Amino acid sequence: MTRQRILITGAAGRLGRELRPRLARPGRTLRLLDIAEVGPPAPGEDAEIVRASFTDPEAIDAACRDVDAVLHLGGLAGEATWERIAETNVKGTLRVLEAVRRRRVPRVVLASSIHAVGFHTRGAMDYMVDGTLPADVPPRPDTYYGVGKAACEALGSLYHSRFGIDVTCLRIGAFRTLPLAPEDLAVWLSPGDAARLVEAGLRAAPAGFRVLWGISGNTRRWWSLKEAEAIGYHPEDDAERYAASIPGATAYDPADPRNHRVGGGFCTMPLG
Ligand SMILES: NC(=O)c1ccc[n+]([C@@H]2O[C@H](COP(=O)([O-])OP(=O)(O)OC[C@H]3O[C@@H](n4cnc5c(N)ncnc54)[C@H](O)[C@@H]3O)[C@@H](O)[C@H]2O)c1
C-alpha cells in the first residue's frame, strides 16, 4: 500500500488539534505545520512537525514536497485589519496554492467560513431551495475576514480551472467541542463531523472545485447539506441534543430579523 502524506497548515489551532487524532490512519503520515508550537508526535503517531509560516515561499514549498493533499487551516480565524487579512489569509493562501502547483499536489481542502457569505439571509428567496441555502451561494462577506475567505475560495477556483487541482472549500460555521450559544444550534460543526467532512473532501472524485457548508446535521440548520452529502459526508452530530443545556435556546428564533443572516453578529461588528 502506498503511504499517503497530508500536510495540515495551522495544525496548532483549534481545528488542527481536534483533527490531528481524528485524521490519523494506518498508512497515512500527517505533516503538521504551524508558526506556533504543535507539540511533538505522540508515541506511535505518524507525524512530521514543521515549525514555519506558510507565507514563506521556500518553507511552504519544502513542506509540500511528497505530499498527496493539503488541508489548509492556518491563518487569522476572525476579524482583523485589511492589511493583516490580505497578507496572511489571502497572500498566504496564494503561497500555499503556488507551492501545491509547483509540487504537483493533486488535492487541497481549504478552510473557508460562513462569513464569506454572511449577508445572505434566510429570506433570500432568489437562492433558497426547498427551504435551505445552497452551499455555493455567491460571496456576500460580512467583514474583511469574510472578504479574505471569499478571495481564498476564488483562488481555489482559479487553481482548479488553470491547473486541474482538486479544491474543496469548507464554509465552516461554529466549530466547537459542544454548542454553547443559541445561534450554535443552527451552525455548529462538531469535531467528529469536521473530520468526516475533511475525509470526504480528501476522497472526492472526479477532480473538481466545490464549496460546501461546514456544519453538523443540526435540526435547526437552514443550510443545505446536499452538496456535501454528494461527496460522501454523513454527519453524525446534531446540536439539538444539547439544546436543553443552552440558556436561551428555546426562545431563539433564527428567522427573527436580528438572527436571520448567515453571518449573525459578524454583520454588525466594527470592521478591521
Ligand atoms: N473555529 C471556527 O469556528 C471556524 C469557523 C469558520 C472558519 N474557520 C477557519 O478554520 C481555520 C482554523 O480555525 P481555528 O479555529 O483552528 O483557528 P485558530 O486561530 O485556532 O488556528 C489557526 C492556526 O493558524 C496558525 N497560523 C496563523 N498564521 C500562520 C502562518 N502564517 N503560518 C503557519 N501557521 C499560521 C496559528 O498559529 C494557529 O495555530 C481558519 O482558517 C478559520 O478561519 C474556523
Image (cartoon, helix red, strand yellow):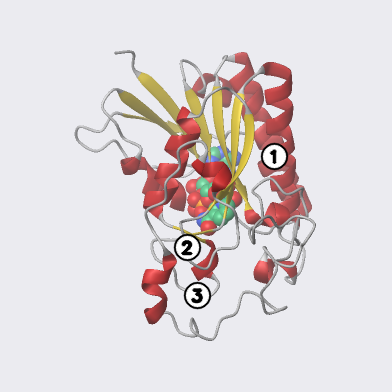
Q: Pointer 1: what residue?
A: 152
Numbered circle sitting on residue 181: 3
Q: Pointer 2: what residue?
A: 218
Residue 164, by quadrant, is top right
Distance from disc 2 to disc 3, alpha carbons, whole Å, reads 14 Å
Which of the pair 166/267 is nearer the observer?
166
Under mark 2, the amino acid is Asn
| Image coordinates for residue 51, horizontal then vertical, percent | 46, 34
The residue that appears at 39% across and 65% down in the rendered structure is: 178
Are there few (<14), some (14-19), or many (20+) residues within 10 Å of tag 2? many
Asked if residue 170 is positioned above or below residue 263 in the image, the reply reads above
Under mark 3, the amino acid is Ala
**Element at label 3:** loop
Asked if residue 22 is positioned above or below residue 255 in the image, the reply reads above
Numbered circle sitting on residue 248: none
| Image coordinates for residue 69, horizontal then vertical, percent | 49, 25
Asked if residue 68 is positioned above or below residue 271 in the image, the reply reads above
Q: Is residue 55 left or right of residue 235?
A: right
| Image coordinates for residue 186, horizontal then vertical, percent | 53, 66
Q: Is residue 23 left or right of residue 130?
A: left
Asked if residue 73 is positioned above or below residue 31 in the image, the reply reads below
Distance from disc 2 to disc 1, alpha carbons, whole Å, reads 26 Å
| Image coordinates for residue 25, horizontal then vertical, percent | 29, 31
- Which callout, 2 or 1, points at the residue further toward the start of the chain? 1
Distance from disc 1 to disc 3, alpha carbons, whole Å, reads 28 Å
Are there few (<14), some (14-19), or many (20+) residues within 10 Å of tag 3? some
Under mark 1, the amino acid is Cys
Is residue 42 among the parts visible in the rendering? yes
Residue 42, by quadrant, is top left
